[in-house]
Amino acid sequence: MKLTPMLEQYLRAKAEVPDALLLFRLGDFYELFFEDAERAARVLDITLTSRSKKDEVPIPMCGVPYHAVQGYVARLLAAGFKVALCDQMEDASNAKGLVARGLVRVVTPGTVTEEEYLDPRQPNYLAAISADGDCLALVAADLSTGETHQAVLAEPAALSEMLTRLAPREILLDAAAADSLVGAVRSAVPAAMLSPLPTARFDAAAGAAWLASHAPAMPVAAGVEAGLGAVLGYLAETHRASVDHLRPPEGDGASAAMLIDEASRRNLELLVTTRGERRGALLDVLDETQTPMGCRLLRQWMLAPLTDLAAIGARLDAVEALLRQPSRRDRLMKLLGTIGDLERLTARLAAARVTARDLLGLAAALAAVAELRDALADVTAAALIGAGADLDPLPSVQERIGRTLADDVPLKPRPGQLIRPGWHAEIDELRELALHGKRFFSEYEARERARTGIGSLKVRYNQVFGYYIDVTKPNLHLVPPEYRRKQTVATGERFVTPELEQYEAKVLGAEERLGALETQLFGELIAAVAAEHATLSRTAAALARIDVFAALALVAERHRYCRPAVGRHRRLVIEDGRHPVVEVMAGRAGFVANDCRLDPENEQILILTGPNMAGKSTYLRQVALIALLAQMGSFVPAARAEIGVVDRLFTRVGASDNLAGGESTFMVEMKETANILNQLTPRSLAVLDEIGRGTSTFDGISIAWAVAEHLHDAPERPLVLFATHYHELTDLARSKERVRNASVAVREWQGDVVFLRRIVPGPASQSYGIQVAGLAGVPPSIIARARHILHNLEQNELTDAGQPRLAAADGGEGQLALFADDRLRQDLAAIDIDRLTPVDALNRLHELVERARRG
């Protein structure tokens, strides 16, 4: 195959980015060739054609318009591809021979900054994981905002928790350790793009040098420096623009935040529901933010609630201040609604990837910042005072943007439409020539017609000859001697004059010079504004905090939340607590509020029984969510709440399997239970729903009983809510002093069951499963048969002494022994043969035989 010089140029560029789809600029299109074209055509659903069709092996190719490339790149990213852009580095009209081209950027999921590629409500992290001895180091950078994080992790579970919380879109792995990490990483963030790099790319020296210049006093582990070096090197290779807006990495905050594992985040439906929908999740109820950066901060606070009492109190003070001053809050929210995503605009400024409209929007946003600062002038809450002090409207930036750019700049301005008239003399002169100089030619045409007497004389233009005078054959005898013949055509002759050529040079050069000068001045403006990136980032962060405080205050007012009392004690006391999502979906009037009290000394474990659909799971979740809301700095849905600081929130709720991992529902349940039992702390809150239901009844009861016993006897004494259908577990309260029973109140009416949704002391009398089946529409004949079978089963529920067979005491160490292996022998030994009638003997024999057959 013989390649043209252009294709040779393409292949040289492709060799630099073998793992990316290369979009190669040819005039008004970006073209793809060879395998890249075949892949892109399938994803983008565009026509696949070929180049050199006469060759024995034609070259596949496809293309997209350059002005619409961002939409196509977004689709390729979503399909899991990296995309490299190779642009023309010179004007094709000025090029001698082949136009110079070069790679300007490699677009990957973790390195994008444009709004078209990003979800405004979520962060967009690029993470790097490196091994440092027995520990793993993680660095995560959000290029779109400048935010970075660091963590040193001693165990795989901590890595999984960090990854699921940050949800990076792309992860750089040390190739030497990739094999051992891929499984855990894929499990935690299955949608992330994995990019293995040679170990040498994890350059600790480069990371240390960057930290020395940006945060000389910041202590970090060697692994963090290596991960930071990998991130910086990767951005230099792909982003190919300034990253001056990146801030020094913050700590992971593990010691100052409540840890919520991925299972708990999923079970509590914090971000999305179990169906994957945002509507019906906690974030959907809380999100009254007016800016994208406020929404992202709210999400961050919700996933990492605080454990520091002073910081929690400061947030609650700010929310309370705006709750008590609705007019101030409304003014703040109205102003915030005009600002947009200042945080991500700052990142695009640093990369010089902004439009004139972006800068005009920035000027308007900074004007709103000035009003916001005035609106906070007399606040008393420390968090609001601090946020107000961080707001800087940068009046010099506003003024420079305002006097430089025209007010009505189009989205894609042509030369002459960018710079404000009257600001730059040369621009004004060139604009006059470029935009209005063509009037000269119409005036010149009229003047020459009158002077020469040629009524059909016309001044025309083409790209070959430029401007010329067209005279038809019948009028050639009237042509003046100063006209110089340029071309003969079928209908006549074309001429030029010195005056025409002189003015043509002015007009045709003016537009090119105008565009170049406007581009230069616009670049200088971008550089001047980007120099303020640190101030802009600080202002954006303050705006996000104000936005979240105002949103939480509005939610508290709208849904009548109370301020929780968060303390160093270990109690959890809630009066008239409600589920923040269910009450919104069901309507406040239709929701029954309930109390809860837990403490490690007297009421450590609450065993909750009751029928399905009665509200057990809602109650469990609402208690966990109230604790979470309180520690993130929000008011809570209750009449009163005392929350002792929780450092770990565990939930085992719901049933799901992991088909991709080959795990059954029961295996998933047991793994989540093991995770809870292995990570208990004295300040843990564990919410367990239906432990053991994924296996046989006897196995399930045994596991549930043993788990409850362990939680009670563990030295940490975590607070536990334990919902179950195994009524045998209610006997735990007889032998475990800190176990209490509660149930969901129901009433039977004419064979049906009525759910009262009220939590009351004591165990449930029965599960009402058959009644619930009837409510669900199971045929009456089946319901009747089920009642008969249940009656038969219940005849053998108790021992001769009237005690539950499954919870007979072992008498040794005060423990309750389930299912003693020799219970059949004991029952036989207990029979008094002297008093046994023949009929009773037959009945007893039949009973024992049936029990033996059942195993």
Image (tube, rainbow, N blue to C red):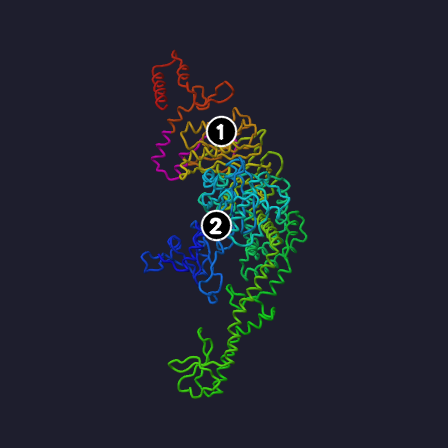
Which image quadrant is residue 597 in? top right
Q: Position of residue 649 (x, y in %)?
A: 54, 37
Q: Nearer the viewer, mark 2 or mark 1?
A: 2
Q: Residues within 10 Å of mark 2 (few under 14, many from 20)?
A: many
Visible residue check, residue 589:
no
Q: Quadrant of the C terminus?
A: top left
Q: Nearer the viewer, residue 280 or 310?
A: 310
Amino acid type assigned to the residue bearing label 1 in the image: Val
- Say whether residue 775 is left or right of residue 580: left
Q: Which residue is pictured at 38% across the width and 29% down the height?
A: 790
The disc, 2 or 1, on the residue closer to the chain's N-terminal end is 2
Q: Is residue 776 magenta?
A: yes
Q: Judging from the image, what secondary structure is the residue with disc 2 in?
A: loop
Q: Which residue is mark 2?
A: 109
Q: Nearer the viewer, residue 61 or 206?
A: 206
Which image quadrant is residue 151 in? top right
Span of residues in magenta? 760-789
Q: Which residue is mark 1?
A: 707
Amino acid type assigned to the residue bearing label 2 in the image: Pro
Visible residue check, residue 248:
yes
Q: Nearer the viewer, residue 214 or 697?
A: 214
Q: Position of residue 387 (x, y in %)?
A: 63, 50
